[in-house]
Amino acid sequence: MTNTGSSNMRPLAVVTGASSGIGYELALQFRDHGYDVIMTSNSDRLLHAAAKLQGNGSEIHQIQADLTTKSGVTSLYSQIRQFGRPIDAIALNAGIGVHGAFIDNSIDDELQLINLNVCSTVHLAKLVIRDMVAEGRGKVLFTSSIAATMPGTFTAVYNASKAFIQSFAQAVRNELKDTGVTITALMPGPTETDFFRWAGELNTKVGTSEKDDPAEVAREGFDALMDGRDHVVAGSLTNSLQAGMAHVLPDTLMAEMHRKQTEPLHPERKS
């Protein structure tokens, strides 16, 4: 755990999956808007990412945490509580993908995805939101995806996990409408991060296509969070059009359209 400065006058934000990509850019948004930030990740790059954000008058803390386990979530929450400060905002951003035909993918990889994308998000949200409701204030950002709006051919478990998060976020938002706590779902499309490499999805049309800037996605997500909006489809106009089509086209057609983006271009290659 590291920090600079000493001021409890600033609001405190927590960002999971903060070592790179959208998570790192969200942490940067919070810092640049006067928040002290707790960055969490299970990546070895977290220390370097936190060091890059030092300065600007904000305290930057980093906590290594394996959120694929229940004990990892409770340990993270316990360490956050040790700061003795209420959480003003949290970005529940940690997530992974698994690409490939469902019958071929490793069940261990897919259960790990569910543990991180779904179970840890629900668990940490339960702990943090209870505290926020007790305080009568707080802002929660869930990183969902436009993948939540459509069946994910060759990313079946990933898309299903994001559909869960999207539904969960909107339901909890309604439950909390009179509490002073707001819930916002960030729905990016394909974004220029390490996600596609980690998911094994480079050998696809979507993996090789031009993608959105994670800094812009994070800015749109931060603005929506501060405005208390229920969701934001971030990035290019194509993302909004794709999300819109999902509301009017049958799932069978959306699954076929998704297949064209995610089917391996060269089946013999495993990249």
Image (tube, grey):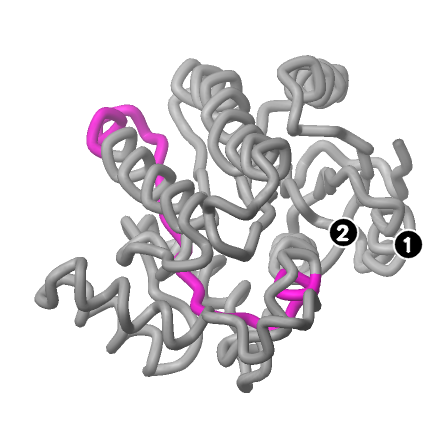
- Residue 175 sits in quarter: top left
Closest to the observer: 263 or 45?
A: 263
Quadrant where the image shows the C terminus: bottom right
| Residue that protrudes farthest toward the bottom in the picture | 210
Image label count: 2
In the image, what residue occupies the spot 33% across and 49% down? 228
Which residues lie in the magenta part? 174-197
**Residue 62 pos. (x, y %):** 82, 38
Numbered tag placed on residue 48 in the rendering: 1
In the image, what residue occupies the spot 38% across and 39% down? 165
Q: Secondary structure at mark 2?
A: loop
**Residue 168 pos. (x, y %):** 31, 33
Instruction: Answer left or right for 179 relative to 31.
Output: left
Q: Is residue 144 above or below residue 62?
A: below
Residue type, mark 2 in image: Ser
Q: Secondary structure at mark 1?
A: helix
Quadrant where the image shows the N terminus: top right
Sequence-first disc among 1 and 2: 2
Closest to the observer: 113 or 33?
A: 113
Residue type, mark 1 in image: His
In the image, what residue occupies the spot 63% across and 32% down? 108
Numbered tag placed on residue 19 in the rendering: 2
State whether residue 49 appears in this view: yes
State whether residue 29 appears in this view: no
Q: Are marks 1 and 2 in contact (CB under 8 Å)?
A: yes
Q: Is residue 187 above or below residue 113?
A: below
**Residue 27 pos. (x, y %):** 67, 53
- Residues packed near mark 1 inside 10 Å, few (<14), some (14 to 19) or many (20 plus): few
Q: Is residue 108 above or below residue 22?
A: above
- Residue 90 sits in quarter: top right
**Residue 148 pos. (x, y %):** 33, 52
